[in-house]
Image: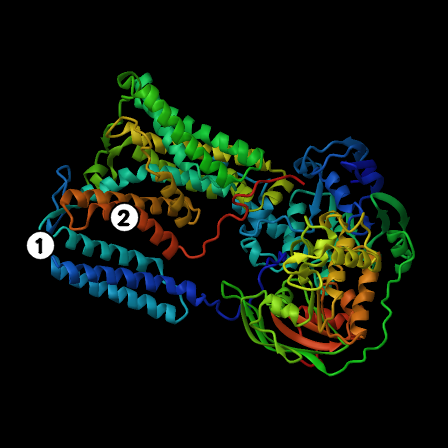
Amino acid sequence: MTLELRGITKRFGPLVANDRISLTVNEGEIHALLGENGAGKSTLMNVLYGLYQADEGELVLDGEVRKFAGPGDAMAAGIGMVHQHFMLVPVFTVAENVMLGNEATGFAGTLDIGAARERVREISQRFGFDVDPDALVETLPVGVQQRVEIIKALSRDARVLVFDEPTAVLTPQETDELMGIMRQLRESGTAIVFISHKLREVRAIADRITVIRRGAVVGEASPTATNAELASLMVGRPVELTVHKEPAQPGPDAFVVRDLRVLDDTGHTHLDGITFSIARGEVLGVAGVQGNGQTELTEAIMGLQSHVRGSIRLGEHELVGRSVRKVLDAGVGFVPEDRQVDGLVGEFTIAENLMLNRSHGLPFVSAGTIRSGVLEEFAQRTLDAYDVRASGIQAKAGQLSGGNQQKVVVARELSRDLSLLVAAQPTRGVDVGSIEFIHKQVVATRDSGVPVLLVSTELDEIVALSDRIMVLYRGQVVGIVPADTPRETLGLMMAGERPEGTAA
Amino acid sequence: MSTTAKVPVPVDESAPTTVPLRTALKAPIMLGVVTLLVSLLIAFKARSGKTTFRLAADTDFFDLPEITVPSTATVATVIVLLAACTAVSALLVGRGRRTPVWLVALFAVVAMIGFLAWAAAGKSVPVIGLLGGSIALAVPLVFGALGGVLGERAGVVNIAIDGQLLFGAFAAAIFGTVVGSPWGGLVAAMLAGALVALVLGFFAITYFVNQIIVGVVLNVLVIGLTSFLFGQVLAEHPQQLNAPDHFERIPIPLLGQIPVIGPVLFRQTILVYLMYAAVVVVAWALYRTKWGLRVRAVGEHPKAADTVGIKVNRTRYTTLLIAGLIAGAGGATYTLVSVPQFGQEMTDGAGYIALAAVIFGRWDPVRATLAALLFGFATNLSGVLSVLGSPVPSQFMLMLPYVVTIIAVAGLVGASRPPAADGEPYRKG
């Protein structure tokens, strides 16, 4: 089946999310849609999938113009989607998820769960998946959940499959396996749209590449193009992809974590006795697939977790058992992993957000009153120094783009004397230009002699910035290795395997 | 602080998941407290004499004998048994395990026998009346709870169960009288329940208004409306508008003649039989049909349902309306059985008890029904004991259903997981 998008335009109020985008995907072809976060890739796919209605343009399947009122229509026409955030009901079994919306029924609407099981087995066999139809989805690893999504699409005889940022939650090994599956699907004649912002993956698998920027197609590229070419197309200017940094000059150990255990309220163990240390002027990268204890580690350091055992020492201070404010007063800077939820107050102005961690006293507060003159002067200076693109310091933080929001958070955390920087996912959902800037700030902080704990699920980011890498798996340290450890080794470690020759 | 991680919690599967001590300890502590309370009964107010339990009804195939026991000795035995149950529970928790449900059930039954032996010393306890009356009193609670389960499974929190019951009772009284048949009243009651559900859906689903607030407002609105109309219209013309025919008891042949079970379960009105059917049908529909799968999907992960072509809000509306029909039928029991007459605020907050049954029953139709039956039993017990002349002040007995609710929900349910999207309006995109 051949899919053609002709001049698709989608507006949200004054914002043009898709501006006359045209795209053709042929049978047995993998077509990559490359663009930054917010470039309009997902909007385009939601139009294709019937979740949004296009304002202009048409959708052509095998030469026939189609109109989709909802996802049901799109599926009936043979379009399937593997969503970035899996569209699976966690408390349902695999078979129930696969049959949902497309149920085989017997007498009086009774579910024919047997037929669904059979379908799951049959498709699993065809692609060599090992998926138990009766397993509860919430108990499955993410990689397997993704396969359930694929089975779900294939069980509706999808001839066009859209993969929306499918590798974001996968380990490098799982990513390789996924690519194998995609190739297999291509061989069987499926047309595939692969949405990504990861250059390496796009180059590895795509037959054709279309680059979108700010809602419009800015060019086509072949998979033989270099990373630099693709990146500059994507961003619209030449981009520095590698982080320039001098070798670390580590001082004495300044931040020492010993036998740290974190439990949640239901008694589950999230961190199981981890031990590490960071020297002054050193970046320790924490690698691992999302959900292996990284969040709990950063929150335990900040005093945000309630069941913490073990010791976290920063210089002379023991941080375990301290309140968040006392941790901040000890000089810990914290870039939280979700800036919208934990990093900023969207309804506050940029200036107000910049003083959130110093709301108790000088320089911004005196006698319980905010010194607006000092704050405004500081905010303006910071805005200029960090190149935050906003209408002014009184703009609401919630209205900024992801990259600019993150710059505000980073600016706030770095604008005071630090004795430790904890940065979690500092560049998630941030445009390439801002990534460059934020990375430079992290390196500069290191060079000023501050220990840095960098948590990221992007292995590239970890490798680029870290001096040593600690890999977490299921709440335990798999190993702490030098930054030049091969990606394959790191990938294995992220899956919990401890390769020979690496110290635990 | 929340995490945005969608991945399952990483736990080492090889190690057994230990139940957190604080949660697990609740059960033995609760059992211990109840054991202590029962002990206090004889310590402070020992009662001499014999207690008789009457088990026979005159319609049975054969007569069961009356059981007569010495009050004090029975209570003493019961206390020993209760202490043993508590010890077993504590022992299990000490080994990192949970207290099994059967142990709690056994404990409850034994404690109840002990309490009755004490309270009715020198008198006789009509066991059949106690149990049969419980079923009758539980009918509105069961219907209400079933409605609540359906609504919440689809993702709409229904605080307005009480309003649905009351409006159903009101409509049943008027239409039962006007039409001249209790069936007319029943249909009107169901439609009245659905009407309340429609208003709830309109605000909660279409306009994203906070569901708790809409529900509470609807309850107050229905109380005000029915009280006003009752005072202004029904009280003026009681014969024309507030004297419905009522449903008669229909003994089921054979089944109704089995000792104990027969008179308790099968010599009831048609509404009770409808309730049995409703429980079975709702449980079957929710778990075994395409419709039920979609309802559950919409309550757990509406976006996922949307992406497979299920109309989320339409599903929520239809489910809520069906739930309204069911809850409304529960309301009919107030005015179409025994005393066929509407009175102001006659539900007495039963809808809130039904809501507690939904949560105690962990959003499952069968468990919620059992919870509702328990509350019905507690209500009837207070009535029966006040007739017997129990030594407990009647005010305390009136509190019993609510105390049972609190103990049940706070003490025994623990952390149960509601449908993930319960109470959250669905916005597209």
Q: Position of residue B246 (x, y in %)?
A: 26, 25
Q: How is the image coloured?
A: rainbow
Please give left or right for residue B250 compared with residue A114 in the image.
Answer: left
Q: Which mark is residue B50?
A: 1
Q: Residue at x 76, y 68 (%)?
A: A462
Q: Which mark is residue A259?
A: none
Name the foreground residue: A208 vs A365: A365
From mark 2 to mark 1, how far is it between C-alphas? 25 Å
Q: Residue at x 33, y 35 (%)?
A: B347
Identify which amino acid the numbered label 2 is placed on: Leu
Chain for disc number 1: B
Specify whether disc 2 shares its chain with disc 1.
Answer: yes
| Label whose residue precedes the other's in the sequence (2 or 1) | 1
Tell me if I can see residue B186 in this picture: no
Above or below, comparing residue B198 to residue A492 in the picture: above
The residue tagged 2 is B400
Mark 1 nearby-residue class (10 Å; few <14, some 14–19, many ≥20):
some
Name the foreground residue: B346 vs A474: B346
Name the foreground residue: B169 vs A209: B169
State which mark lies toward you, 2 or 1.
Answer: 2
Q: Position of residue A347 (x, y in %)?
A: 68, 48
Q: Quadrant of residue B261?
A: top left
Q: Quadrant of residue A298?
A: bottom right
Above or below, comparing residue B286 to residue A362 in the picture: above
Chain for disc number 2: B
Q: Position of residue A197 (x, y in %)?
A: 80, 54
Please give left or right for residue B329 compared with residue A28 in the image.
Answer: left
Q: Quadrant of residue A284?
A: bottom right
Tell me if I can see residue B369 in this picture: yes
Please give left or right for residue A334 compared with residue A106 in the image.
Answer: right
Identify which amino acid the numbered label 1 is placed on: Lys
